[in-house]
């Protein structure tokens, strides 16, 4: 049993890239299978026992079930069912607020806000989240994203990458980031004309490209904030846009 999903994913990353545990497979964030030859003395961080006794390593408690006299344990649930999303790199997800699950990330396809990311309670957009350069499990399984992974977030329908426009808001385009001293500037370069009235931005070529700013999977915890954009020229409700700052937590569903 894991304290939370982050612990489960971090634990699996460590195990999945170690050659001595390549016979372990992840069937869900809470359930793992292994070939009987896995020996408990091969790892100081955890053990897979042939008995039902638990191995407590602080945040994780592992139970071995289904072997010998304990085979009957497969007939009853040892871990309560959990409604969780597996953070598989390259999959498509909706992104919603952890504090208020009614709020979803959305990209309008036309109109004044086309191509920008807003928070909506009536519409939602599916995004593909892919880890950059994350090590693949040695057993050939899917890569599970963890907080320290650099990720690319793109609109699933068009493949256009989420970046930051000249106003500091999230928008679609090819993101290019540079560090200027202690200040970070990200701009968006348009890939094409798929979305009508897409925001116009100018790409800045100054700065150190080796220090390009990245988006990490862990940024979904607190980096993206909601900023109402007031427009006094219309009586419509203020558009809630996403920007970089002291943000709230967002989850993949």
Image (spheres, rainbow, N blue to C red):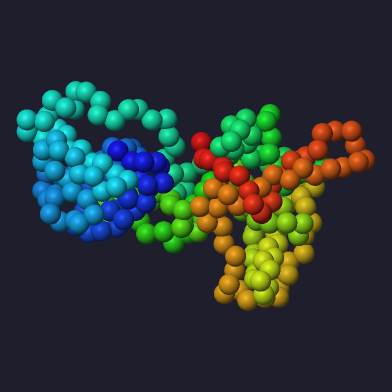
| Residue 192 image-quadrant placement | bottom right
Residue at the image position 29 percent from the left and 44 percent from the top: 60
Q: Position of residue 174 (x, y in %)?
A: 64, 59
- Name the image quarter holding residue 88: top left
From the viewer's perspective, tell me whether residue 82 is left or right of residue 90: left
Which sits in the foreground, 35 or 75? 75
User: Which x, y percent locates residue 191?
Assistant: 68, 57
In this rendering, the count of numbered labels is 0
Q: Residue at x 26, y 48 (%)?
A: 57
Drawn side of residue 195 relative to residue 62, left or right? right
Q: Position of residue 231 (x, y in %)?
A: 87, 42
Viewer-proximal residue among 109 and 208: 208
Q: Residue furthest right?
A: 233
Q: Is residue 132 visible?
A: yes
Q: Where's the N terminus, which quadrant?
A: top left
Q: Is residue 195 visible?
A: no
Q: Quick check: 209 above or below 130?
A: below
Q: Residue furthest left?
A: 69
Residue drawn at x 63%, y 76% is 208
Residue 216 position within the rendered picture, expressed as x and y whole percent measured from the top left:
52, 56
Would you say 66 lies left or right of 198 here? left
Q: In the rendered view, does 57 fall on the left or right side of 81?
A: left
In the image, farthest residue toward the top: 75
Q: Residue at x 37, y 51 (%)?
A: 10
- Residue 211's place in the image compared with 243, above or below, is below
């Amino acid at each position: 049993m894991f304290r939370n999903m982050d612990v489960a994913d971090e634990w699996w990353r460590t195990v999945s890239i170690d050659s001595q545990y390549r016979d372990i497979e992840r069937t869900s964030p809470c359930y793992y299978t292994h070939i009987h030859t896995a020996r408990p003395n091969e790892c100081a961080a955890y053990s897979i026992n042939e008995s039902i006794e638990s191995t407590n390593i602080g945040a994780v408690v592992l139970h071995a079930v289904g072997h010998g006299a304990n085979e009957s344990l497969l007939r009853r649930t040892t871990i309560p069912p959990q409604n969780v999303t597996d953070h598989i790199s390259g999959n498509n997800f909706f992104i919603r607020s952890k504090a208020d699950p009614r709020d979803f990330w959305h990209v309008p396809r036309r109109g004044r806000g086309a191509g920008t990311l807003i928070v909506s309670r009536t519409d939602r957009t599916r995004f593909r989240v892919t880890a950059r350069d994350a090590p693949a499990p040695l057993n050939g399984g899917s890569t599970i994203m963890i907080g320290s992974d650099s990720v690319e977030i793109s609109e699933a329908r068009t493949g256009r990458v989420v970046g930051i426009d000249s106003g500091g808001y999230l928008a679609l385009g090819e993101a290019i980031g540079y560090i200027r001293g202690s200040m970070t500037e990200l701009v968006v370069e348009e890939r094409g004309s798929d979305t009508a009235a897409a925001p116009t931005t100018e790409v800045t070529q100054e700065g150190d490209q080796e220090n390009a700013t990245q988006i990490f999977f862990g940024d979904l915890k607190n980096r993206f904030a909601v900023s109402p954009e007031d427009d006094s020229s219309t009586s419509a409700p203020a558009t809630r846009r996403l920007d970089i700052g002291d943000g709230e937590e967002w989850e993949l569903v």
